[in-house]
Image (cartoon, grey):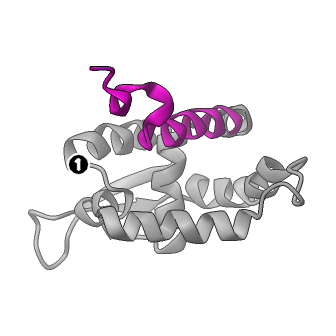
Amino acid sequence: MTHEQLKLENQLCFPFYAISRLIIRKYQNLLNELGITYPQYLVLLVLWETDYQPVNDISKRLFLNTNTITPLIKRLEKLKIVKKEKGQDDERKMYVKLTDKGLQLKEQAAQIPYKLVEGVDASKIDLIELKISLDNMIGILK
């Protein structure tokens, strides 16, 4: 038996893994200027949309477990980009809030999405169509 289904070239997941790694590498070059990692950038993207959110909500939004998100938030806290606060209604709930530095980073980061796609030949790939397809897949798989 050859088990064609086990060949790397026949795996649906591998191209996603490879493209993810390649894109994150490009992002990291841009994020180094801000002094943050790609996972930290994701947390900030969520907070830049809506500041002051429970840790659990951030975790859900990023499809990460709280035990993964907590160290990211701690590192952002050490960098004085965010701060944690106990919930006013429920002290067991921890909220994450941007600091002034975190808000300033938003302005610096605003050009990153544009820089990332600079040089992408639009005749070879429709980024909007690709994004729609990927969002559809996420909706199916979650």
Determine if residue 34 is in view. Answer: no
Give left or right: position of 85 versus 83: left
Up the image or down, 119 lies above or below 26; here it is below
**How many neighbours does mark 1 have within 10 angstroms: few (below 14), some (14-19), or many (20 or more)?**
few
Which residue is denoted by mark 1 in the rendering? Answer: 65
Q: Is residue 59 magenta?
A: no
Residue 41 placed where, x, y %?
54, 48
Give left or right: position of 98 versus 122: left
Q: Nearer the viewer, residue 68 or 24?
A: 24
Q: Give the residue displayed 67% in from the left and 40% down from the top.
A: 27
Q: Give the residue displayed 72% in from the left and 32% down from the top.
A: 29
- Magenta stretch mostly in which secondary structure? helix
Residue 77 placed where, x, y %?
41, 43
Q: Residue furthest bottom?
A: 89
The range drawn in magenta is: 1-26
Please count the marks in the image.
Answer: 1
> Dividing the picture into quarters, in which one does residue 125 lie?
bottom right
Q: Quadrant of the C terminus?
A: bottom left
Q: Residue furthest front?
A: 1
